[in-house]
Image (cartoon, rainbow, N blue to C red):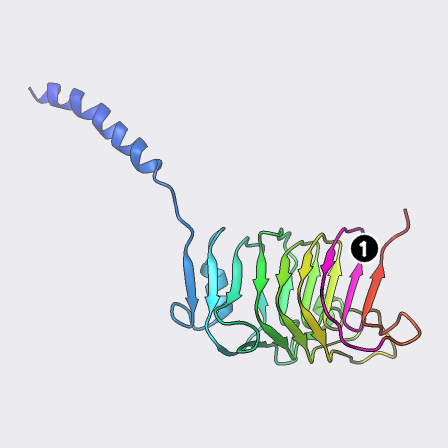
């Protein structure tokens, strides 16, 4: 009798295990500061496909996507949601092979600094060997020494769409490349209606946009 019950129970248990394994895992929405007090904390907890939604306010931090294919967006837009880099590093870093599925959207990014750890480039957003989507942001009041005071894009096929880049500056150098944005290295980055409302000087150094790549 006991043996008969065991024989019939086996397939049922196996079927249950298969059924449980087939349950789809749904992407999560993580709220800042509702679920986590910091944006970086929410990014660290997120899994592929998740969305981090940031409520209005000013967040004093420097964030790194760390290779995660997630969306980090503001709840109400760049006009009321700011990430302040405190002058210690780029406000946002992408350097872990992120693809266009890694999305940054709807922030004012200010007071970032392209320090030595980031090749003195990309005070607002530093992109290196990664290809994120960056859209609907205001990149302002950042600084770098070597290049890309606002945004620096190297060896990347990033999509930079509908951003405003303004008021970024050179720090610690007599000249650099791309006062607003620089794109360099072998890449196919797309810069789509992005505004850099600064009158360009007569040379490339320090101009609003610099495009530099190795010759074929």
**Which residue is under mark 1?**
185
Q: Nearer the viewer, residue 93 or 162?
A: 162
Residue 93 coordinates in the image, percent (x, y) = 64, 64
Residue 8 in view, yes or no: yes
The answer to whether residue 10 is left or right of residue 1 is right
Q: Quadrant of residue 155?
A: bottom right
Q: Quadrant of the N terminus?
A: top left
Residue 198 coordinates in the image, percent (x, y) = 79, 77
Q: Quadrant of residue 78?
A: bottom right
Q: Is residue 183 magenta?
A: yes
From the viewer's perspective, is residue 60 above or below residue 30? Answer: below
Q: Residue at x 63, y 57 (%)?
A: 133
Residue 145 coordinates in the image, percent (x, y) = 79, 75
Q: Residue at x 54, y 72 (%)?
A: 77
Residue located farthest toward the front when viewing the structure as drawn: 193
Residue 60 coordinates in the image, percent (x, y) = 55, 79
Q: Is residue 51 magenta?
A: no
Magenta region, main secondary structure: loop
Count how many numbered circles sit on residues in the image: 1
Q: Secondary structure at mark 1?
A: loop
The answer to whether residue 20 is left or right of residue 143 is left
From the viewer's perspective, is residue 10 above or below residue 79? Answer: above
User: Which region of the structure is painted magenta?
Assistant: 179-199
The answer to whether residue 98 is left or right of residue 47 is right
Q: Nearer the viewer, residue 120 or 109?
A: 109
Q: Quadrant of residue 169?
A: bottom right
Q: Residue at x 8, y 22 (%)?
A: 2
Q: Nearer the viewer, residue 104 or 174?
A: 104
Callout 1: few (<14), some (14-19), or many (20+) C-alpha neighbours within 10 Å? some
Q: Nearer the viewer, residue 90 or 49?
A: 49
């Amino acid at each position: 009798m006991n043996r008969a019950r065991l024989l019939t129970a086996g397939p049922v248990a196996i079927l249950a295990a298969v059924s449980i394994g087939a349950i789809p895992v749904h992407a999560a929405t993580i709220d800042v500061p509702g679920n986590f007090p910091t944006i970086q904390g929410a990014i660290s907890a997120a899994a592929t496909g998740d969305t981090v939604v940031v409520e209005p306010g000013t967040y004093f931090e420097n964030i790194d996507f760390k290779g995660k294919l997630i969306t980090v967006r503001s709840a109400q837009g760049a006009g009321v949601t700011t990430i302040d880099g405190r002058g210690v590093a780029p406000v946002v870093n992408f350097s872990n092979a992120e693809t266009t599925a890694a999305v940054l959207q709807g922030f004012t990014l200010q007071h970032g600094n392209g320090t030595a750890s980031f090749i003195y480039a990309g005070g607002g957003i530093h992109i290196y060997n990664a290809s994120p989507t960056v859209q609907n942001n205001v990149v302002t009041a950042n600084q770098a020494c070597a290049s890309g005071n606002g945004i620096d894009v190297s060896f990347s096929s990033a999509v930079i769409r509908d951003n405003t880049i303004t008021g970024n500056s050179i720090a610690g150098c007599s000249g650099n490349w791309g006062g607003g944005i620089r794109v360099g290295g072998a890449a196919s980055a797309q810069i789509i209606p992005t505004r850099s409302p600064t009158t360009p000087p007569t040379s490339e150094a320090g101009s609003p946009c610099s495009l530099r790549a190795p010759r074929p």
